[in-house]
Amino acid sequence: MSLIDVKNVRKGFGDLEVLHDISFIVDKGEVVCLIGPSGSGKSTMLRCINLLEDIDEGEIDVFGQNISELKDINSYRRRVGMVFQQFNLFNNMDVLNNCVLAQMKVLKKDRKEAEARAFKELQKVGLGDFVRAYPSTLSGGQKQRVAIARALCMDPEILLFDEPTSALDPEMVGEVLNVIRDLAKEDMTMVIVTHEMAFARDVADKVIFMDDGVIVEEGKPALIFDQPKNERTRQFLARIL
Amino acid sequence: MSFAKCIEILTKYYLSFLLGIRTTLIVAISGTLFGLMIGLFVGGFRAIRLDKTASGTKKTVKKILDIVGRIYIEVFRGTPMMVQAVFIYYLVYTNIVRWGKMTAAIFVISINTGAYMAEIVRSGIQAIDPGQNEAARSLGMSSMQTMMDVILPQAIRNAFPAIGNELIVNIKDSSVLMIISITELMFQSNSIAGTTYRFTETYFLTAAIYLILTGLSSIILGMIEKRMNHTRTSLPQSDTSYSSISLANKGAKS
């Protein structure tokens, strides 16, 4: 069963159309990596799935429902976690409270229960010792792992990653990718926009190559990376690899 | 001007000065606090960005209230508080209710300060990275929850120097409220000067008292600001809190 079904989506900012007729599906438990040059519309596509952007034409069905027609956006968003390039931790709270806040406000858990869950997720991403640290004292890699733990606390059924390692120093990329790898092993459904080709090849069930607002090619990572059919895919991979 | 005369006036009329100080402080502090509340409400509302998917009626209501807020701010920033004081005092007194002068004074200074505070709060909110808002919304929090728990606490902290500045402005500018003859410091000074005919000495004392009041406020506000910044950069705590959470964790499982 497909969890996400994107059908003929068009999206523009003013006169500039950034997504031209995009369609793809994501099955339950599948890891899909969106790759492609900057400005190709990957992040915009991801943001549309979480309703951070609205689409102009087409339809996005998630959990079998057209998300443009949802009445309760907040309870939908709770089920679809999002991790951002710039981490976007709440700077006025320590790590623990970053993970506790939405559990109490949205899931209406009491503090004790929320803290226990937050602590469990923080341990999972290797930050059990940092519960009382403030975001400003953490490294980029640590911040991104907190952001992942924060999303996991909400029990999401889908996780969206918008270039999770692009703002990191090279030596911190690995620690974040390892956390995502572990999630893939647990069959978490994930859509990941990334420039880490080796990672995409390793972790993805399906790779989608986008360029200039269209899907140029999609398929199993081995096919895309070893036998790209399209000339544009070949050129892009030649530049990156 | 003679300092001996100053001391003479001070010893003779210190009770009048004290009464003036008391009224000035009551008006300035309550005006700043109520003004801050108005500012949080108006500025916070003006800074809310509706979802792109919000309904048409929601967008229209928001637009209309934004315009009302804008007019309020422009009118109260664009006219002298002295004029606002006499106009509002008599408007209400003759048409609605025979209200007390002190109530009128606090009312006027509050809505006047509120107009400035609204802009301070709004710019404080807009200085917060929009990513914070997106992150909170992506976790399923409503725009109201996001504003109250994530955005406003950070905005107030960032805007605190500007908010504190309004208190200092109010201590000085409450002097114009003597126009509706409340017994604040300037009003008291006028009566003392009128009795003693020692204008220079009296107003020298008045100026000195205002300077002491604003100076003390500066020091106190500085201390509060330092404290606020301290909590932000506090380092990871010791093992005690760590293990207590660890215990809570076990407790929740069993």
Image (spheres, rainbow, N blue to C red):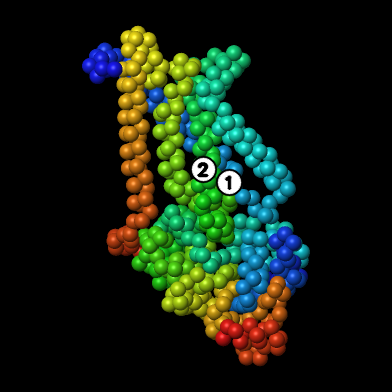
Kindly give the residue lying farthest to the left in the view shown: B4
Of B238 and B168, the residue lying toward us: B168
Q: Are marks 1 and 2 in contact (CB under 8 Å)?
A: yes
Residue A147, relative to residue B176: is it above or below? below
Kindly give the residue lying farthest to the bottom in the view shown: A227
Disc 1 is placed on an element classified as helix
Disc 2 is placed on an element classified as helix
Q: Could you tell me which chain the residue with mark 1 belongs to?
A: B
Q: Position of residue B27 (x, y in %)?
A: 43, 25
Question: Residue at 32% of width from left, 26% of height from top?
Answer: B208
Residue B3 in sight in this render: yes
In the rendering, which numbered label is found on residue A33?
none
Residue B76, relative to residue B52: is it above or below? above
Question: Residue at 46% of width from left, 77% of height from top?
Answer: A170
Q: Callout 2, which amino acid?
A: Val
- Of the 4 image quadrants, the one containing the N terminus of chain B is top left
> Which picture quadrant has residue B184?
top left
Q: Residues within 10 Å of mark 1 (few under 14, many from 20)?
A: some
- Of the 4 image quadrants, the one containing the C terminus of chain B is bottom left
Q: Which residue is mark 1?
A: B47
* Same chain? Circles 1 and 2: yes
Q: Cα distance, mark 1 to mark 2?
A: 9 Å
Q: Which residue is mark 2?
A: B121
Q: Residues within 10 Å of mark 2 (few under 14, many from 20)?
A: many
Q: Is residue A26 left or right of residue B216?
A: right
Residue B230, relative to residue B80: is it above or below? below
Q: Position of residue A11 (x, y in %)?
A: 72, 64
Residue B244 in sight in this render: no
Question: Residue at 48% of width from left, 60% of height from top?
Answer: A89
Q: Earlier in the sequence, mark 1 or mark 2?
A: 1
